[in-house]
Image: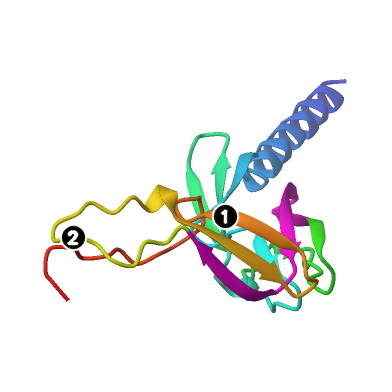
Amino acid sequence: MRKSKVLSVVILSIVLVMSLIITACSGALAIKEIQIDKSTYSGVFVVGEEIDYSKIQVKVVYEDDSEKTFKLTDNGVTYTAIDTSTIGTKEFKITVEGSSIVLSAVVNPALKNIEIFNAKTNYALNEEVDYSAILFKAIYGDDSEKYINVTSEGVTYSTIDTSTAG
């Protein structure tokens, strides 16, 4: 009887120690959130564009609020490639350590031509330029058109220096 009690205590102790070891070894933190690094992913592409996935990064936030940045080409990271062969909104899924984020990607037709409207060509010395008045028409490869204000998000333009003549 005494031997069976000792044996039971020993077995129970071994089970307890093993469960502690297993818990300690599987101590990977749970992922609370995955965030795309917007400086590495615009979400807007052109038909036929080849995407360099090695430049896209995500930040993983763990349950203890610690963070780690991953490139899509790092071990433990998988993703679905974006089909840029056709226009439209596409799904872009990124999985890190078993947790996923699903993003939208927009594939636009290729730009064929730009026509500018309301662009003043002569300015007085030190005259302020009203960029918000300048419009352009984007004409795409599929002959669709879109009027866009120069100051719209995503549009880059050079400023006009009116401080000197010429």
Residue in the foreground of this view, choosing between 39 and 140: 140
Residue in the foreground of this view, choosing between 130 and 33: 130
Q: Secondary structure at mark 2?
A: loop
Residue in the foreground of this view, choosing between 47 and 27: 47
Magenta run includes residue 154: no
- Residue 121 seen from this side: yes
Magenta run includes residue 97: yes
Main secondary structure found in the magenta portion: strand
Q: Quadrant of the C terminus?
A: bottom left
**Residue wearing tag 2:** 124
Q: Position of residue 61 (x, y in %)?
A: 55, 42
Q: Secondary structure at mark 1?
A: strand
Q: Position of residue 35 (x, y in %)?
A: 58, 46
Question: Which disc number belongs to residue 148?
Answer: 1
Q: Position of residue 15 (x, y in %)?
A: 77, 35
Which quadrant of the view contains residue 143?
A: bottom right
Q: Is residue 24 above or below residue 82?
A: above
Looking at the rendered structure, the kind of residue marked 2 is Ala
Q: Which residues are magenta?
A: 91-117
Distance, label 2 to label 1, CA atoms, is 26 Å
